[in-house]
């Protein structure tokens, strides 16, 4: 007779149209793989995975985050009382000191997320925005990260870093890959796509409502590129006051499969985001796209990346325009094998990341 066992998984977001949700979906796959390895060919145990997630969503990013964290603490109280083993797979930033103090030691944690300090020269926001980023990202978060790392070591919590900054904060000496590199879907989509797909899009960019994505600078740069006859496409939320060049193709939102279609037809990707994560640039590299980005970001760690600014240079639309225009001209003379090499190198990084995150 089969013995039934249910594995409980807490996910603050399981939607696959955003980074946290996709990271959760990947880790559920990780759990399934681990359980299959443990069970092997045994037929004496019937294991099911139950994912519990908040039943409501709020439109405000800030309010929704507060709601999700509050919901997660409520779930932790329940599992502390019942003393059941539970997997917690996302909304796990290193700065969340209270979480690492309160989480049961028996809980299995998904990859711990977090970024490093921001180079303020590369931040294109207002003076007040730059001050806010400096206080939060460069002063407060490193302090909270340090406190959390001490708590993690003190409580002997088992964690895996999702980014290099988290690995450094935890004083891990081994070369740790980024968690998003375990995403197998881009490679499957790349292989299923017609290899003769025409590169009809010169530049594709994806932006969002987070301040360190440098959305306003990206819009200004793409407008300039559209004026010189390049086929430019922009996807994502922009401010209501933004003015777009009439030749620029804009999509506020797109289903994921349509976004993949745009990537497959793109020669280059521009990402001025200062984040260390970034599914968009990872997917683009899987399709062999050159990623034009800023240093010390997620895009800069990818094969075929082209760094647009040096660390000592300040972000400037004119300067970025000149460098992107030159790179695009160079790329038009590059053979197709450059694209194939980028995809091949990234697939090797993907295999290494899968081995790192899927091991016991």
Image (cartoon, rainbow, N blue to C red):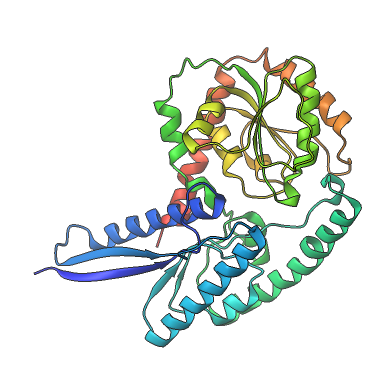
Nearer to the camera, 7 or 18: 18
Q: Position of residue 286 (x, y in %)?
A: 52, 33
Residue drawn 39% across the image and 27% down it: 192
Q: Residue furthest top?
A: 333
Q: Residue furthest bottom?
A: 81
Q: Position of residue 162 (x, y in %)?
A: 57, 57
Nearer to the camera, 106 or 169: 106
Quarter-of-image position of residue 281: top right
Q: Is residue 13 shown above or below 333?
A: below
Q: Position of residue 252 (x, y in %)?
A: 63, 37
Q: Is residue 113 shown above or below 242?
A: below
Residue drawn 75% across the image and 42% down it: 240
Camera sees residue 157: no
Name the quadrant of the N terminus. bottom left
Q: Position of residue 146 (x, y in %)?
A: 70, 72
Name the quadrant of the C terminus. bottom left
Q: Residue furthest left?
A: 1
Q: Is residue 269 shown above or below 313?
A: above
Q: Give left or right: position of 65 versus 131.
A: left
Q: Is residue 86 shown above or below 64?
A: below
Q: Give left or right: position of 58 versus 227.
A: left
Q: How many marks?
A: 0
Residue drawn 84% across the image and 48% down it: 125
Camera sees residue 307: yes
Nearer to the camera, 227 or 114: 227
Residue drawn 43% across the image and 32% down it: 189
Quarter-of-image position of residue 223: top right
């Amino acid at each position: 007779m089969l013995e039934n066992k249910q594995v409980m998984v807490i996910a603050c977001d399981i939607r696959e149209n955003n980074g946290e949700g996709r990271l959760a979906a990947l880790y559920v796959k990780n759990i399934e793989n681990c359980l299959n390895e443990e069970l092997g060919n045994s037929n004496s145990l019937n294991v099911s995975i139950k994912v519990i997630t908040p039943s409501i969503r709020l439109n405000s990013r800030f309010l929704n985050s507060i709601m999700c964290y509050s919901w997660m603490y409520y779930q932790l109280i329940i599992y502390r009382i019942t003393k059941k083993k539970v997997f917690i797979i996302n909304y796990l930033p290193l700065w969340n000191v209270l979480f690492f103090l309160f989480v049961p030691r028996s809980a299995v944690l998904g990859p711990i997320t977090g970024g490093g300090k921001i180079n303020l020269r590369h931040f294109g926001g207002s003076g007040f925005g730059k001050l806010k980023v400096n206080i939060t990202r460069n002063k407060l978060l490193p302090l909270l990260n340090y406190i959390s790392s001490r708590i993690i070591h003190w409580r002997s919590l088992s964690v895996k870093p999702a980014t290099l900054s988290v690995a450094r904060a935890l004083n891990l000496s081994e070369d740790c890959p980024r968690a998003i590199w375990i995403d197998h879907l881009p490679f499957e989509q790349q292989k299923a796509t017609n290899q003769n797909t025409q590169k009809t899009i010169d530049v594709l960019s994806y932006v969002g409502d987070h301040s360190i994505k440098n959305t306003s600078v990206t819009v200004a740069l793409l407008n300039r590129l559209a004026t010189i006859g390049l086929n430019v496409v922009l996807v994502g939320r922009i401010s209501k006051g933004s003015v777009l060049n009439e030749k620029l193709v804009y999509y506020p939102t797109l289903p994921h499969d349509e976004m993949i279609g745009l990537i497959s037809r793109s020669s280059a990707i521009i990402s001025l985001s200062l984040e260390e994560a970034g599914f968009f640039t990872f997917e683009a590299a899987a399709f062999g796209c050159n990623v034009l980005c800023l240093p010390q970001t997620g895009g800069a760690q990818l094969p075929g990346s082209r760094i647009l600014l040096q660390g000592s240079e300040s972000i400037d639309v004119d300067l970025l325009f000149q460098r992107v225009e030159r790179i695009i001209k160079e790329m038009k003379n590059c053979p197709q094998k450059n694209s194939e090499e980028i995809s091949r190198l990234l697939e090797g990084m993907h295999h290494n990341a899968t081995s790192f995150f899927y091991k016991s």
